[in-house]
């Protein structure tokens, strides 16, 4: 039997629909309540937080690097300035896949793969977020145009103008002024991240490094508003940076060039010091190099050529070159002997051409194998008589010799502002015992008396020791800065003056040095006789390879780079010292024949006028002139 058809219950359906509508409405109102509550929480409760966060996303603080201080010579000639240059910068946070962007840069500009590696190294250096990193300097107009055309492929890349260090005189001041270079990872860890924000260079060598804090200046800041892509829309606030202080050197450009010319392209070093002030007037180390490529990043190939050159152009011979001083220390030895009381000005030693210790058959040869006969102090200095100074060294002994030579600055750093300076070596009993675990032998004392053996000095130390003789023991550290920011440098650790028992001892040494240049048998009389003023000087020869006992030096059998070094030190005018000079000519062999003419040429450039006449301000006092007449 068929089932009856149920009639539709409209009332029940209506109740069901109303219930669902009510539930839906309640859910909607609950969701609206949650949304309103969330909006209230974000817009009211956390208003300050999100307002600051939004402002930080829109407003950025950008550092403004200061202009580096300029460097001048003593006469106002610029030796280090800042030159405008266009650089290619990359901001990692805006570049996305920045390694791919570097590939595009290399492709667009047609650069070698080694530049790609250098770019990556620069970008990976730890820097502040959103800080542009220069990857390529000194862009040409063609390179700028290529970057502009391919800008859509180079997100985060911009061409910016900035000041880059430049050395207009190039290699003339490479070893004294030094150069700046890019900040490396090790330096980043030591630097103040605030002061160096925005800066990419730092002093690496020379006064650029020593006076880095003064030359660098103080960083500035500006608050800028940016869009979503990080492009600057407007500047909201600005604090200007403080430029670095200008540095005035003691060096005279003309004298520097004259010294380089006098050296004549030979390997060597020259230091000229103003006696009364300690100012370094010239500082030459040859061969030299152009420091400009180091500023923006020298290529691997170019650096390898400099580093591996047999002539070592990167090596600062003035400050780091260690050489036996040879006979240039004999004036200091004479002063030590007089002050210690082991000799007098009239003390004589008979020279048969050699010296022998008591009860010893070994002969310590004089350079003049035929001997000079009976010699006193003045003659010993004039002739550079080794036998006399062997005897003097034996009488002094190593202990007193070490103490006196140390007072003259040998074996220690003597400069005020040359951080690269090497201390050298003034040996002692304790030094040898600690180094070789051996006792000190009398024969070692003898050869030390003529500046050979373990003793190692720099050309700067010899110049300072000569200055002390000219200055009667008054200690003024040699320095390169005349003023920094208009203020003279101060020696915070002054060295005590050398005080002798009798001040006349200085004059005995000076007279002997004068005889070297102007005496009838002086070793450098040919140079001295052509001078328009009196020079007090002393020659020296530093052995490069040892000569066996009894053998003679034969230059034809010795390779050029194994020949003796030629040294000469002196000051002038002898009666009223104004300038002290030390000269080293590597493998020059003869101090009097090779180094002495260089010394005279440097002194002439400083003391004589254009007509070759001694400048009036350097003339000896009237009483000195009367005595000479």
Image (cartoon, rainbow, N blue to C red):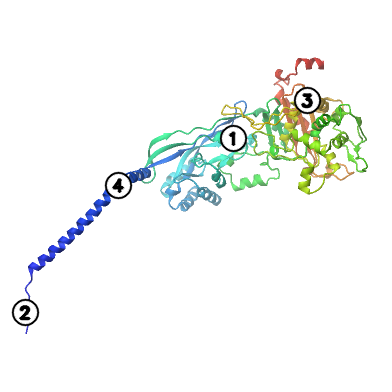
The residue labelled by disc 2 is: 4
Closer to the chain start, of discs 3 and 2, is 2
What is the count of numbered marks? 4
User: Is 296 displayed left or right of 222 in the figure?
Assistant: right
Q: Residue at x 31, y 45 (%)?
A: 47
Q: Are marks 4 and 1 in contact (CB under 8 Å)?
A: no
* Res. 107 visible in picture: yes
Closer to the chain start, of discs 1 and 3, is 1
Closer to the chain start, of discs 4 and 3, is 4
The residue nearer to you, when weighing 270 against 409, is: 409
The residues tagged by marks 1 and 2 sit, at their Cα atoms, a distance apart of 111 Å
- Considering only vertical position in the picture, is 80 above or below 136? above
The residue labelled by disc 4 is: 45
Circle 4 or circle 1, nearest the eye: 4
Point out the image quarter for the N terminus: bottom left
User: x, y (%) of residue 382?
Assistant: 85, 29
Name the secondary structure under disc 3. loop
Q: Are marks 3 and 2 in contact (CB under 8 Å)?
A: no
Closer to the chain start, of discs 4 and 2, is 2
The residue labelled by disc 1 is: 211
The residues tagged by marks 4 and 2 sit, at their Cα atoms, a distance apart of 66 Å
Name the secondary structure under disc 4. helix
Q: Residue at x 61, y 33 (%)?
A: 169
The residue nearer to you, when weighing 113 against 546, is: 546
Q: Residues within 10 Å of mark 1 (few under 14, many from 20)?
A: some
The residue labelled by disc 3 is: 535
């Amino acid at each position: 039997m068929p089932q009856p058809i149920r009639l539709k219950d409209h009332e029940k359906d209506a109740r069901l629909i109303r219930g669902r509508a009510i539930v839906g409405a309640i859910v909607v109102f609950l969701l609206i309540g949650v949304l309103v509550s969330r909006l209230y929480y974000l817009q009211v409760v956390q208003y300050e937080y999100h307002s600051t966060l939004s402002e930080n996303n829109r407003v950025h603080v950008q550092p403004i690097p200061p202009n580096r201080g300029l460097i001048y010579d003593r006469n106002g000639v610029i030796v280090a300035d800042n030159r405008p240059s266009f650089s290619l910068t990359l901001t990692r946070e805006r570049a996305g896949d920045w390694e791919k962007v570097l590939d595009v840069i290399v492709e667009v500009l047609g650069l070698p793969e080694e530049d790609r590696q250098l770019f990556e190294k620069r970008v990976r250096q730890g820097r502040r977020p959103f800080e542009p990193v220069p990857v390529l300097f000194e862009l040409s107009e063609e390179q700028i145009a290529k970057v502009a055309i391919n800008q859509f492929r180079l997100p985060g890349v911009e061409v910016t103008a900035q000041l880059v260090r430049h050395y207009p005189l190039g290699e003339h001041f490479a070893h004294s002024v030094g150069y700046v270079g890019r900040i490396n990872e090790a330096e980043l860890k030591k630097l103040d991240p605030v002061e160096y924000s925005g800066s990419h260079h730092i002093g690496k060598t020379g006064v650029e490094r020593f006076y880095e804090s003064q030359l660098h200046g103080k960083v500035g800041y500006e608050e800028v508003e940016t869009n979503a892509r990080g492009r600057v829309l407007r500047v909201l606030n600005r604090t200007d940076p403080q430029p670095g202080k200008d540095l005035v050197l003691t060096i005279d450009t003309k004298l520097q060039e004259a010294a380089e010319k006098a050296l004549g392209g030979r390997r060597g070093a020259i230091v000229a010091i103003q006696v009364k002030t300690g100012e370094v007037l010239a500082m030459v180390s040859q061969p030299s190099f152009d420091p400009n490529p180091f500023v923006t990043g020298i290529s691997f190939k170019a650096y390898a050529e400099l580093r591996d050159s047999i002539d070592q152009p990167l090596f600062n011979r003035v400050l780091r070159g260690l050489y036996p001083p040879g006979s240039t220390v004999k004036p200091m030895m004479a002063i030590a002997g007089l002050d210690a009381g082991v000799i007098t000005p009239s003390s004589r030693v008979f020279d048969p051409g050699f010296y022998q210790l008591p009860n010893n058959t070994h002969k310590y040869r004089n350079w003049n194998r035929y001997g000079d006969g009976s010699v006193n102090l003045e003659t010993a200095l004039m002739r550079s008589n080794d036998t006399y100074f062997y005897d003097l060294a034996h009488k002094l002994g190593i202990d007193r010799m070490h103490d006196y030579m140390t007072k003259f600055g040998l074996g220690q750093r003597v400069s005020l502002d040359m951080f690269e300076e090497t201390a050298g070596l003034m040996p002692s009993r304790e030094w040898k015992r600690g180094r070789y675990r051996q006792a000190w032998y009398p024969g070692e004392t003898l050869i030390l008396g003529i500046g050979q053996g373990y003793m190692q000095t720099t050309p700067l130390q010899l110049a300072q020791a000569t200055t002390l003789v000219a200055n009667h023991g008054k200690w003024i550290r040699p320095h390169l800065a005349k003023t920094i920011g208009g203020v003279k440098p101060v020696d915070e650790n002054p060295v005590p003056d050398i005080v002798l028992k009798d001040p006349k001892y200085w004059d005995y040494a000076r007279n002997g040095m004068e005889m070297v240049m102007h005496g009838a048998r002086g070793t450098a009389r040919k140079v001295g006789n052509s001078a328009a003023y009196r020079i007090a000087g002393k020659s020296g020869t530093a052995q490069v390879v040892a000569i066996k006992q009894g053998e003679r030096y034969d230059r034809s059998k010795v390779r050029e780079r194994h020949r003796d070094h030629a040294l000469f030190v002196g000051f002038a005018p002898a009666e009223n010292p104004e300038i002290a000079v030390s000269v080293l000519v590597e493998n020059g062999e003869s101090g009097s024949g090779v180094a002495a003419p260089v010394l005279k040429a440097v002194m002439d450039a400083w003391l004589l006028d254009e007509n070759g006449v001694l400048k009036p301000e350097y003339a000896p006092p009237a009483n000195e002139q009367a005595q000479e007449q």
